[in-house]
Amino acid sequence: ILFKKTTDLHKYLDVQLLNGSTIGFVPTMGALHSGHISLIKASKKENKITVCSIFVNPAQFNDPNDFEKYPVTTEKDIYLLEAAGCQVLFLPLVKEIYPEGMNPKMYYDLGYLEKVLEGKFRPGHFRGVCMVLHRLLEIVKPSRLYLGQKDYQQYMVVRKLIELIRMPEVQIVICPTLREADGLAMSSRNMRLTGDERKKAAGIYKCLDFIKQNLNSINLIQLKINALQLLGQAGFKVDYIEIADANNLEPVTRWDGKQKLIALVAAFLNEVRLIDNMLLS
Ligand code: AMP
Protein backbone atom coordinates (compact mmCIF):
# COMPACT_ATOMS: atom_id res chain seq x y z
CA ILE A 1 0.00 0.00 0.00
CA LEU A 2 1.36 3.39 -0.96
CA PHE A 3 0.81 6.24 1.50
CA LYS A 4 1.59 9.86 0.78
CA LYS A 5 -0.13 11.40 3.80
CA THR A 6 1.03 10.98 7.39
CA THR A 7 -2.52 10.82 8.74
CA ASP A 8 -3.44 7.91 6.45
CA LEU A 9 -0.29 6.01 7.32
CA HIS A 10 -0.96 6.61 11.03
CA LYS A 11 -4.46 5.17 10.79
CA TYR A 12 -3.21 2.08 9.00
CA LEU A 13 -0.31 1.49 11.40
CA ASP A 14 -2.48 2.04 14.49
CA VAL A 15 -4.69 -0.85 13.37
CA GLN A 16 -1.64 -3.04 12.78
CA LEU A 17 -0.27 -2.22 16.23
CA LEU A 18 -3.64 -3.02 17.84
CA ASN A 19 -3.48 -6.40 16.11
CA GLY A 20 -0.13 -6.99 17.77
CA SER A 21 1.94 -6.69 14.57
CA THR A 22 5.55 -5.60 14.88
CA ILE A 23 6.69 -2.93 12.46
CA GLY A 24 10.06 -2.97 10.73
CA PHE A 25 11.15 0.29 9.14
CA VAL A 26 13.58 0.87 6.26
CA PRO A 27 14.11 4.59 5.57
CA THR A 28 15.65 5.36 2.15
CA MET A 29 16.12 8.11 -0.38
CA GLY A 30 14.96 5.88 -3.22
CA ALA A 31 16.76 4.89 -6.43
CA LEU A 32 16.60 1.49 -4.83
CA HIS A 33 19.11 -1.29 -5.45
CA SER A 34 19.79 -4.73 -4.00
CA GLY A 35 21.44 -3.18 -0.93
CA HIS A 36 18.17 -1.50 0.03
CA ILE A 37 16.23 -4.65 -0.79
CA SER A 38 18.47 -6.68 1.54
CA LEU A 39 17.26 -4.40 4.37
CA ILE A 40 13.64 -5.00 3.33
CA LYS A 41 14.26 -8.75 3.39
CA ALA A 42 15.90 -8.58 6.81
CA SER A 43 12.89 -6.67 8.12
CA LYS A 44 10.41 -9.08 6.56
CA LYS A 45 12.04 -11.97 8.36
CA GLU A 46 11.54 -10.36 11.76
CA ASN A 47 8.37 -8.26 11.49
CA LYS A 48 4.80 -8.75 10.37
CA ILE A 49 4.72 -5.37 8.61
CA THR A 50 7.62 -3.73 6.78
CA VAL A 51 7.44 -0.02 6.02
CA CYS A 52 9.85 1.51 3.51
CA SER A 53 10.04 5.27 3.14
CA ILE A 54 11.38 7.07 0.10
CA PHE A 55 12.18 10.69 0.76
CA VAL A 56 15.05 12.64 -0.73
CA ASN A 57 15.63 14.78 2.30
CA PRO A 58 16.62 18.33 1.29
CA ALA A 59 17.78 19.08 4.86
CA GLN A 60 20.70 16.64 4.67
CA PHE A 61 22.30 17.86 1.43
CA ASN A 62 25.10 20.31 2.04
CA ASP A 63 25.75 20.47 -1.72
CA PRO A 64 22.77 21.77 -3.76
CA ASN A 65 24.20 20.20 -6.91
CA ASP A 66 24.21 16.77 -5.24
CA PHE A 67 20.55 17.25 -4.25
CA GLU A 68 19.49 18.29 -7.76
CA LYS A 69 21.30 15.40 -9.36
CA TYR A 70 20.11 12.79 -6.87
CA PRO A 71 18.54 10.00 -8.96
CA VAL A 72 14.77 9.49 -8.79
CA THR A 73 13.41 6.17 -10.11
CA THR A 74 10.07 5.90 -8.30
CA GLU A 75 8.31 3.53 -10.74
CA LYS A 76 11.15 1.04 -10.61
CA ASP A 77 11.41 1.41 -6.82
CA ILE A 78 7.73 0.51 -6.42
CA TYR A 79 8.23 -2.52 -8.62
CA LEU A 80 11.25 -3.69 -6.58
CA LEU A 81 9.39 -3.18 -3.28
CA GLU A 82 6.39 -5.15 -4.53
CA ALA A 83 8.64 -7.95 -5.75
CA ALA A 84 10.35 -8.07 -2.33
CA GLY A 85 6.96 -8.27 -0.56
CA CYS A 86 7.29 -4.94 1.27
CA GLN A 87 3.78 -4.15 2.52
CA VAL A 88 3.96 -0.38 2.90
CA LEU A 89 5.67 2.43 1.02
CA PHE A 90 5.59 5.90 2.54
CA LEU A 91 6.26 8.48 -0.18
CA PRO A 92 5.72 11.90 1.39
CA LEU A 93 6.17 15.36 -0.11
CA VAL A 94 8.51 17.80 1.61
CA LYS A 95 5.60 19.67 3.27
CA GLU A 96 4.39 16.44 4.83
CA ILE A 97 7.72 15.90 6.57
CA TYR A 98 8.45 19.55 7.32
CA PRO A 99 5.03 21.21 7.75
CA GLU A 100 6.65 24.06 9.66
CA GLY A 101 9.64 24.43 7.37
CA MET A 102 13.11 23.05 7.68
CA ASN A 103 14.16 24.62 10.97
CA PRO A 104 15.34 21.94 13.37
CA LYS A 105 12.79 21.46 16.17
CA MET A 106 15.52 20.66 18.62
CA TYR A 107 19.29 20.80 18.93
CA TYR A 108 20.78 17.39 18.32
CA ASP A 109 23.97 17.21 20.34
CA LEU A 110 25.98 14.62 18.46
CA GLY A 111 29.28 15.68 20.03
CA TYR A 112 32.39 14.26 18.41
CA LEU A 113 30.43 12.33 15.77
CA GLU A 114 29.40 15.55 14.06
CA LYS A 115 32.93 16.91 13.90
CA VAL A 116 34.78 14.10 12.13
CA LEU A 117 34.71 12.33 8.75
CA GLU A 118 31.29 12.87 7.11
CA GLY A 119 30.44 15.38 9.84
CA LYS A 120 33.51 17.45 9.03
CA PHE A 121 33.30 17.24 5.25
CA ARG A 122 29.52 17.67 5.01
CA PRO A 123 28.65 20.42 7.49
CA GLY A 124 25.04 20.20 8.65
CA HIS A 125 24.53 16.82 7.01
CA PHE A 126 23.91 14.86 10.20
CA ARG A 127 21.63 17.57 11.58
CA GLY A 128 19.49 17.00 8.48
CA VAL A 129 19.64 13.24 8.98
CA CYS A 130 18.48 13.69 12.59
CA MET A 131 15.64 16.00 11.56
CA VAL A 132 14.21 13.60 9.02
CA LEU A 133 14.63 10.48 11.12
CA HIS A 134 13.21 12.13 14.21
CA ARG A 135 10.08 12.96 12.21
CA LEU A 136 9.91 9.58 10.46
CA LEU A 137 10.36 7.63 13.70
CA GLU A 138 7.55 9.59 15.32
CA ILE A 139 5.32 8.83 12.35
CA VAL A 140 6.13 5.13 11.92
CA LYS A 141 6.95 4.19 15.54
CA PRO A 142 8.73 1.01 14.46
CA SER A 143 9.85 -1.83 16.70
CA ARG A 144 12.95 -2.26 14.58
CA LEU A 145 14.88 0.13 12.36
CA TYR A 146 17.02 -1.32 9.57
CA LEU A 147 20.20 0.50 8.55
CA GLY A 148 23.10 -0.41 6.26
CA GLN A 149 26.71 -0.69 7.39
CA LYS A 150 27.55 1.21 4.19
CA ASP A 151 26.72 4.41 6.13
CA TYR A 152 28.50 3.41 9.30
CA GLN A 153 28.81 6.89 10.81
CA GLN A 154 25.14 7.50 10.07
CA TYR A 155 24.33 4.34 12.01
CA MET A 156 26.26 5.73 14.98
CA VAL A 157 24.46 9.06 14.66
CA VAL A 158 21.07 7.33 14.60
CA ARG A 159 22.03 5.31 17.67
CA LYS A 160 22.74 8.62 19.43
CA LEU A 161 19.53 10.19 18.06
CA ILE A 162 17.39 7.42 19.53
CA GLU A 163 18.94 8.20 22.90
CA LEU A 164 18.42 11.97 22.47
CA ILE A 165 14.76 11.72 21.46
CA ARG A 166 14.11 9.09 24.12
CA MET A 167 12.87 6.28 21.90
CA PRO A 168 14.94 3.45 23.40
CA GLU A 169 12.25 0.96 22.42
CA VAL A 170 13.39 1.20 18.80
CA GLN A 171 15.85 -1.58 18.12
CA ILE A 172 18.48 -0.81 15.46
CA VAL A 173 19.44 -3.65 13.16
CA ILE A 174 22.58 -3.05 11.11
CA CYS A 175 22.86 -4.99 7.85
CA PRO A 176 26.03 -5.80 5.86
CA THR A 177 27.06 -3.76 2.82
CA LEU A 178 26.02 -5.34 -0.47
CA ARG A 179 28.64 -5.04 -3.21
CA GLU A 180 28.91 -5.40 -6.97
CA ALA A 181 31.03 -8.27 -8.32
CA ASP A 182 34.18 -6.08 -8.40
CA GLY A 183 33.68 -4.96 -4.78
CA LEU A 184 32.09 -1.54 -5.37
CA ALA A 185 29.54 -0.89 -2.61
CA MET A 186 26.07 -0.59 -4.12
CA SER A 187 24.85 2.99 -3.96
CA SER A 188 22.20 5.12 -5.65
CA ARG A 189 24.99 7.52 -6.62
CA ASN A 190 26.69 4.80 -8.71
CA MET A 191 24.05 5.52 -11.39
CA ARG A 192 25.73 8.85 -11.95
CA LEU A 193 29.10 7.30 -12.85
CA THR A 194 30.16 7.27 -16.52
CA GLY A 195 31.42 3.97 -17.98
CA ASP A 196 35.01 4.96 -17.39
CA GLU A 197 34.34 6.15 -13.83
CA ARG A 198 32.43 2.98 -13.07
CA LYS A 199 35.50 0.93 -14.01
CA LYS A 200 37.66 2.99 -11.65
CA ALA A 201 35.14 3.03 -8.80
CA ALA A 202 36.10 -0.35 -7.34
CA GLY A 203 39.41 1.31 -6.39
CA ILE A 204 37.82 2.28 -3.06
CA TYR A 205 37.09 -1.33 -2.18
CA LYS A 206 40.58 -2.36 -3.29
CA CYS A 207 42.07 0.32 -1.06
CA LEU A 208 40.00 -0.83 1.96
CA ASP A 209 41.00 -4.40 1.27
CA PHE A 210 44.65 -3.35 1.01
CA ILE A 211 44.40 -1.83 4.50
CA LYS A 212 42.79 -4.97 5.89
CA GLN A 213 45.38 -7.30 4.34
CA ASN A 214 48.31 -5.25 5.64
CA LEU A 215 46.99 -4.47 9.09
CA ASN A 216 49.56 -6.66 10.82
CA SER A 217 52.56 -5.87 8.65
CA ILE A 218 52.60 -2.06 8.20
CA ASN A 219 52.13 0.53 10.95
CA LEU A 220 48.83 2.37 10.73
CA ILE A 221 50.27 5.79 9.88
CA GLN A 222 52.24 4.40 6.95
CA LEU A 223 49.30 2.22 5.96
CA LYS A 224 47.12 5.31 5.63
CA ILE A 225 49.75 7.07 3.50
CA ASN A 226 50.00 4.03 1.20
CA ALA A 227 46.24 3.77 0.92
CA LEU A 228 45.97 7.46 0.06
CA GLN A 229 48.54 6.98 -2.70
CA LEU A 230 46.60 4.02 -4.04
CA LEU A 231 43.41 6.06 -4.28
CA GLY A 232 45.22 8.99 -5.90
CA GLN A 233 46.74 6.70 -8.52
CA ALA A 234 43.32 5.19 -9.18
CA GLY A 235 41.99 8.65 -10.11
CA PHE A 236 40.19 9.67 -6.89
CA LYS A 237 40.18 13.01 -5.13
CA VAL A 238 40.11 11.99 -1.49
CA ASP A 239 38.08 13.75 1.24
CA TYR A 240 39.34 11.41 3.96
CA ILE A 241 40.72 8.01 4.63
CA GLU A 242 40.77 7.02 8.27
CA ILE A 243 41.48 4.02 10.43
CA ALA A 244 39.38 4.38 13.56
CA ASP A 245 37.99 2.67 16.62
CA ALA A 246 34.74 1.10 15.40
CA ASN A 247 33.02 1.93 18.69
CA ASN A 248 33.54 5.71 18.65
CA LEU A 249 35.31 6.60 15.36
CA GLU A 250 38.33 8.07 17.15
CA PRO A 251 41.41 7.75 14.89
CA VAL A 252 43.81 4.98 15.86
CA THR A 253 47.51 5.29 15.07
CA ARG A 254 48.72 2.36 17.13
CA TRP A 255 46.75 -0.85 17.25
CA ASP A 256 46.91 -2.98 20.38
CA GLY A 257 45.64 -6.01 18.46
CA LYS A 258 42.38 -6.03 20.44
CA GLN A 259 40.56 -2.80 19.57
CA LYS A 260 37.79 -3.22 17.02
CA LEU A 261 38.98 -1.22 13.99
CA ILE A 262 37.23 0.17 10.95
CA ALA A 263 38.64 1.85 7.85
CA LEU A 264 36.49 4.58 6.28
CA VAL A 265 36.87 6.39 2.97
CA ALA A 266 35.15 9.24 1.14
CA ALA A 267 36.44 10.19 -2.29
CA PHE A 268 35.34 11.82 -5.50
CA LEU A 269 35.49 10.45 -9.00
CA ASN A 270 35.09 13.75 -10.83
CA GLU A 271 31.65 15.01 -9.67
CA VAL A 272 30.46 11.92 -7.83
CA ARG A 273 31.29 11.44 -4.18
CA LEU A 274 31.47 7.86 -2.96
CA ILE A 275 31.83 6.53 0.59
CA ASP A 276 32.64 3.08 1.89
CA ASN A 277 34.07 1.35 4.93
CA MET A 278 35.36 -2.01 6.09
CA LEU A 279 35.62 -3.55 9.52
CA LEU A 280 39.25 -4.59 9.96
CA SER A 281 39.27 -6.66 13.11
P1 AMP B 1 19.98 5.73 1.19
O1 AMP B 1 18.85 5.51 0.25
O2 AMP B 1 21.31 5.89 0.52
O3 AMP B 1 19.70 6.82 2.20
O4 AMP B 1 20.13 4.40 2.04
C1 AMP B 1 19.05 3.87 2.77
C2 AMP B 1 19.55 2.75 3.63
O5 AMP B 1 20.11 1.71 2.82
C3 AMP B 1 20.67 3.18 4.60
O6 AMP B 1 20.49 2.56 5.85
C4 AMP B 1 21.91 2.68 3.90
O7 AMP B 1 22.98 2.44 4.78
C5 AMP B 1 21.41 1.40 3.28
N1 AMP B 1 22.27 1.01 2.16
C6 AMP B 1 22.70 1.81 1.15
N2 AMP B 1 23.53 1.11 0.35
C7 AMP B 1 23.65 -0.12 0.86
C8 AMP B 1 24.39 -1.29 0.49
N3 AMP B 1 25.18 -1.31 -0.57
N4 AMP B 1 24.26 -2.40 1.26
C9 AMP B 1 23.45 -2.39 2.36
N5 AMP B 1 22.73 -1.32 2.76
C10 AMP B 1 22.84 -0.20 2.02
Image: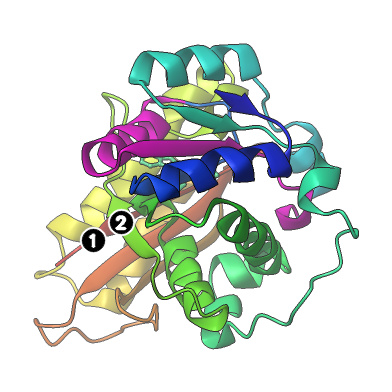
Which residue corresponds to mark 2? 173
Give x and y (percent) for residue 162.
Answer: 49, 73
Give x and y (percent) for residue 99.
Answer: 87, 54
- Alpha carbon of mark 1 to alpha carbon of mark 2: how far? 17 Å
Rendered residue at 32%/49% (across/down):
207
| Residue interval drawn in magenta | 33-61
| Amino acid under disc 2 | Val
Nearest to N terminus: mark 1 or mark 2: 2
Indicate whether residue 50 is drawn in magenta: yes
Task: Identify which residue, 82 or 236, lies in the foreground.
Answer: 82
Rendered residue at 35%/61% (across/down):
172
Q: Considering the image in quadrants, where does the N terminus appear?
A: top right
Which residue corresponds to mark 1? 279
Callouts 1 and 2 close, C-beta under 8 Å? no
SS under mark 2? strand
Rendered residue at 23%/52% (across/down):
210
Give the quadrant of residue 138.
bottom right
Judge depth for marks 1 and 2 and give the one in front. 2
Rendered residue at 15%/67% (across/down):
215
Task: Identify which residue, 175 or 240, lies in the foreground.
Answer: 175
Give x and y (percent) for residue 234.
Answer: 44, 39
Residue 211's label in the rendered image is none
Give x and y (percent) for residue 51.
Answer: 47, 38
